[in-house]
Amino acid sequence: MSIGNSPEDERPFENEHVEADREEARPSIGRALQQARIAAGLTVDDVSSATRVRMNIVHAIEADDFSACGGDVYARGHIRTLAKAVNLDPEPLLAQYGDEHGGRPAPTPAAPLFEAERIRPERRGPNWTAAMVAAIVAVVGFVGFTMFQGDDSGNEANVAEGSTPSDSASPTTKTKKPADPKPEASDSAIAAAPQDKVTVRVAAADGRSWIAAKDHNGRMIFDGVLKQGDTKTFQDSSKVHLVLGDAGAIDLFVNGKKIEENFQPGAVERLTYTKGDPEAG
């Protein structure tokens, strides 16, 4: 008589271990977003500024706490936005969120349509007040027309005698010339940058990139994504701080000179430029 467990009794425990190993092999949603952000060289502040998602929500999502999102719809939107900001495919994360939180939210049924009730117009009698007003207006108009005709005949007589009516002279109107349009800014304006200021021009030549620019006081001048072909110009009295999300996609011009730096694709660069001959600080 055997007192040990049979192979059939041990199989459920083996299956549980296999499932546990699979779960451990796949990182959580928050862990995946955090690892991708660190790999991209971005801080939580950088991601919050780029996506407009508050820092406390970013911290909560990276800790797999979605209660601060305000519901499944907002949680899915935050996951998609954060994944794109750290160059991560959002679809597997959304599928994982659906598996862990009960799938996609049920669609809201359309509201029933109701046919508007037709209102029958009431029958009204003749409006005698309106008829009287119309008659009075007609009489006044006829009298005014008769007086105007008599006045015109007097003016014609004066013209025949050689006199000129006092109100016949037409005033001379002066036409104003349109103001000259202001010339648009061009590359020549960047080349002729003022010496008492620092001028930085950023061009997304080889792809899209997130850009952040601050003045010498640390005040944010620009925070957003440049699409391929877009350009932005920043100017300050003494200093401009830059953060380039994908420096390899950017052409950089400082104080009228192109910066010949071998930025790598996908590299995050933090640069500072001042007046005079450009040199990154």
Image: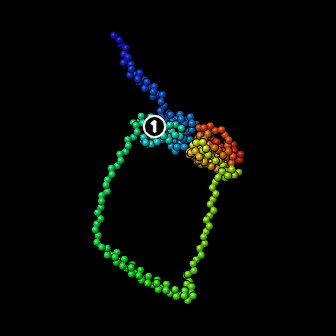
Give the SS element for disc 1: helix
Drawn side of residue 259 relative to residue 207, left or right: right
Q: Is residue 213 above or below residue 24?
A: below
Give the residue at x 60% y 42%: 206
Please indicate, yes or no, whether residue 62 appears anywhere in the rendered image: no
Q: The C terminus lies in which quarter of the figure? A: top right
Colour scheme:
rainbow
Q: The N terminus lies in which quarter of the figure? A: top left
Drawn side of residue 92 relative to residue 205, left or right: left
Give the residue at x 64% y 52%: 186
* Residue 37 position in % (x across, y down): 54, 36
| Disc 1 packing (10 Å; few <14; some 14–19; many ≥20) | many
Give the residue at x 42% y 83%: 143
**Residue 55 or 168: which is nearer the viewer?**
168
Residue lying furthest bottom in this view?
A: 161
- Identified by mark 1, the residue type is Leu
Drawn side of residue 253 relative to residue 12, left or right: right
**Residue 40 or 218: which is nearer the viewer?**
40
Please indicate, yes or no, whether residue 143 appears anywhere in the rendered image: yes
Residue lying furthest top in this view?
A: 1
Mark 1 = which residue? 94
Give the residue at x 66% y 46%: 253
The image quadrant of residue 14 is: top left
Q: How many marks?
A: 1
The image quadrant of residue 105 is: top left
* Residue 5 position in % (x across, y down): 37, 16
* Residue 156 position in % (x across, y down): 52, 86
* Residue 128 position in % (x across, y down): 31, 75
